[in-house]
Image (cartoon, helix red, strand yellow):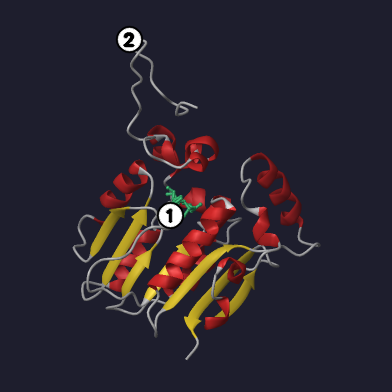
Amino acid sequence: MPPTNALTTDDPSLTVVDPYYANLPAYMTEVYAWAYVNPKKVRWLDHNLVVRILLFFNDQRLIRTYLNEIREGMRIWQVAHVYGDLVKRVAVKTGPQGTFHLTDITPIQIEHAICKLRDKPWCKVIHKDAAEFTGEKGIDYDLICSFFLLHEIPDEKKYKVVNNILEMLPKGGKAIFIDYGNPAKWQPIRYILKIVNTLLEPFAEVLWKNEISHYANNAEKFVWEKKTFFAGVYQCVVVRHKD
Ligand SMILES: C[S@@+](CC[C@H](N)C(=O)[O-])C[C@H]1O[C@@H](n2cnc3c(N)ncnc32)[C@H](O)[C@@H]1O
């Protein structure tokens, strides 16, 4: 199947592929192109208000949960870009004595992240799949964060991303997964999300039944601490090596 936005030319033997869409996995071009790949839409979406509305006004407490784990001078890997000012806040809290590495798979997200972080030389934006990133020489990360990535990727990718994060986690380090959880039956948002998931988020609802530890090959080697927010709509799972 040709890429969704293959451009046409007069020469029938030639297909010009838009570089913003090139080499992306199918879930990005077939499910999430409107949200993360199309540069015009991304320009509209990259604002705090979008994150606030998407998270039913829970954005600040979820962001705080991540920021509270950061100490000045830490070495941090965030596995994917997030709209709004989150990455700038992480960079500021990490500070010039620290290191902040941000990976993303999508060219336009990389451009936006570079614009946000370009005046902070302790930050580096890296065009890489979170399932394949093997880090930078000599750096052991103190904190690795996945902020609302898992619900957007197919199950086989969830396994790869979770296991890569755990493989990259040194003894003494922490991984933090902030994402959707299993909303309580009485929580009206549960039923709104059911509709959203059916229409737009085909890989999200599996997190209602699978714990994040389900995706780890060696879950028993780690300590998994889970907190939930907003009657279970969201979860934060902090993972450490056992002793
Ligand atoms: C973190 S998630 C969702 C976050 C949140 N909804 C927001 O406001 O941006 C979105 C990001 O994940 C990126 N992404 C998707 N699959 C990825 C992968 N395998 N590795 C790294 N980044 C990925 C997308 O390009 C996008 O920038």
The residue at the point 48 percent across, 41 percent down is 28
| Observer able to see residue 162 | yes
Confirm if mark 2 falls within 8 A of ligand 1.
no
Location of residue 166 by image quarter = bottom left
Q: CA distance from mark 1 to mark 2?
A: 39 Å
Q: Which dot, 1 or 2, sits closer to the camera? A: 2
Badge 1 residue CB within 8 Å of ligand 1: yes
Work out whether mark 1 precedes mark 2 in sequence or the reverse, and give the earlier one. Answer: 2
Left or right relative to 204: residue 119: left
Foreground residue, 230 or 127?
127
Is 140 on the left-hand or right-hand side of 163? left
Name the residue type under label 1. Answer: Val
Q: Nearer the viewer, residue 85 or 80?
A: 80
Task: Give the image quarter of residue 94.
Answer: bottom left
Q: Which mark is residue 82?
A: 1
Residue 229 lies, with reference to residue 52, above or below; the image says below
Is 173 left, or right, of 138 in this rendering? right
Between 12 and 92, the residue placed more toward the observer is 12
Picture disc at residue 11: 2
x 26%, y 70%: residue: 99
Tell me where residue 74 appears, x and y as whole percent.
31, 77
Query: 33 above or below 225?
Result: above
| Quadrant of the image occupied by residue 168 | bottom left
Residue at coordinates 68% horizontally, 67% vertically from top-left?
Answer: 232
Residue 236 appears at what percent x and percent y? 56, 71
Q: Residues within 10 Å of mark 1 (few under 14, many from 20)?
A: many
Query: Which element carries disc 2, helix, strand or loop?
Result: loop
The local secondary structure at tag 1 comes to loop
